[in-house]
Image (spheres, grey):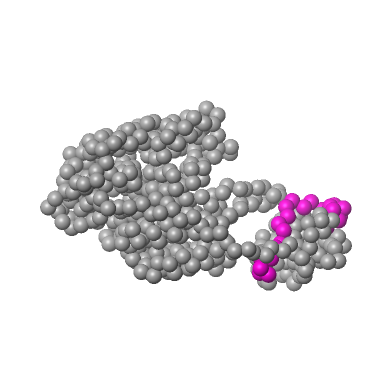
Amino acid sequence: MTALKEPAQTADTQTADTQPANIQTALVPVSVVYGDGIGPEIMDATLRILAAAGARIIPQEVRMGEALYKAGHTSGFAPDAWDSLRRTGIMLKAPITTPQGGGYKSLNVTLRKTLGLYANVRPCRAYAPYVPTHHPEMNLVIIRENEEDLYAGIEHRQTREVMQCLKLITRPGCEKIVRYAFEYARANGRQKVTALTKDNIMKMCDGLFHTVFDEISAEYPEIKAEHQIIDIGTARVAARPEAYDVIVTLNLYGDIISDVAAEVAGSVGLAGSANIGDTFAMFEAIHGSAPDLAGQDAANPGGLISAAALMLGHLGQHEVAAKIQNALLCALEDGMHTQNIAGPHTKKVLGTQAFADAVIERLGRVPQHLPAVTADANAKEIPVRHPTTPAYIDKQLVGTDVFFEWTDSGRDPDVLAAILQEAQLRNIPLKMITNRGVKVWPGGLPETFKSDHWRCRFQSDTPVKHGDLLALLIRVHDKGLDFIKTEHLYTFDGEPGYSLGQGQ
């Protein structure tokens, strides 16, 4: 596990950056993706800054994005791109455009999952008063699980009326991201880690994340740990972001709140992010490709510049990262702004390349009012700690949920129940019918809206065999019913491994 070490910030404005004794001199190959829309413009600006600052890298272009999609590569890149990525182990990526319509995979999701980039790290800090914000003290880091959740992309159309998307959460995935959050906090002197979930509703999936958070937080007694429900947590990030230090959360929630936090800080255009795995790392701006701005020399390269600084820190080139970050802060202090962050302190509205020139002109300077960044030569990698192997768990099959598409008899659940009771096995009786997760039999209410999608639970009081369930499905088939899916019911050490359903 590799930790991102934040450059130390100090109010000392007398010196720029210190030159660490263990400075790296070798040039490091870096895979560079120019992207789509505004991507090539902001990448050119960023690479010019890196070169002027003395970054010890060798950019190697890798072609990905819209042109590759349209050439027939549904993943967005040609197969030989993997060879470059494996050689370098590190990537700086501009935003990509995924074409509209079906058949195109998200390139970002593919990269993150294929390369094992499980930790998405998004620092969000205010640059007040030079970039307008209502929260000048804001300085938080969002650590988002990057591989699981609804981003598994497993979706099905099950009936004429109903689509399904599977949310997959694993214990090893939870352990990796929660531990990374606490190790990040420890490495960077952060005082608090807050977990955000929706485990009051998704008691099993989000409940697992909360459980793992409580278990792992006990290993870090010097760091305050707290848990909040995601809806109120999001509201508080928007209203009182200075109350947070490090936030760790699931994939979808992290995607949403990191954009909220970046916008609250002043601009999504200034926010960079890191995607960290055990053997590979990818750095990118968090905003999109903004095709409406492409070719106008109007985009803010600040997010990609910030991402590049994170990359240099990851590579151990802390002094160059600090030099670039300080020059960026100086440009902001001096009122050198792009249109998207223009405000009362703007002295000149610049285009993309002119903004890069303004940063280059200030290399070697430190800000006079914003906290200066100093190089940290003592940053260390966090040792890889693999998820624990669980003890033996007794798993017993006790039934199955059978899903049907059914619209007969006015969608009366009593009629469906009567048909299924004729098909049930004596030792695996029908226990419950739900529609969209709401129990409608036995004891349902006539006011409940019913789609054409029914979950019918057959459950035994004792363990059963798979052959019993096959026999049950044959009897159901003989009744002329269209079963579209089954989910077997298991107990784990005697505890149900399935939700009971609303009304139970």
Mark yes or no: residue 362 visible. Answer: yes
- Residue at left offset 86%, top offset 66%: 426
Q: Residue furthest left?
A: 14
- Residue at left offset 41%, top offset 65%: 194
The boundaries of the magenta stretch are 472-495
Mark yes or no: residue 342 visible. Answer: no
For this view, does 491 lie left or right of residue 376? right
Q: Residue furthest top?
A: 71
Q: How many marks are shown on the rendered structure?
A: 0
- Residue at left offset 78%, top offset 57%: 466
Give the x, y percent position of residue 170. 56, 57
Q: Nearer the viewer, residue 231 or 223?
A: 223
Give the x, y percent position of residue 87. 42, 34
Question: Above or below — where is 39 with respect to 1?
Answer: above
**Residue 315 belongs to magenta span:** no
- Residue at left offset 33%, top offset 36%: 28
Question: Above or below — where is 407 with respect to 113?
Answer: below
Question: Above or below — where is 92 with respect to 411?
Answer: above
Give the x, y percent position of residue 470. 81, 54
**Residue 490 belongs to magenta span:** yes
Query: Residue 416 is drawn in which quadrant?
Result: bottom right
Q: Nearer the viewer, residue 321 or 387?
A: 387
Question: Above or below — where is 123 with respect to 81?
Answer: below
Give the x, y percent position of residue 67. 47, 30
For this view, does 424 lie left or right of residue 355? right
- Pick the quarter of the image with the C terminus: bottom right
Q: Nearer the viewer, residue 410 or 285?
A: 285
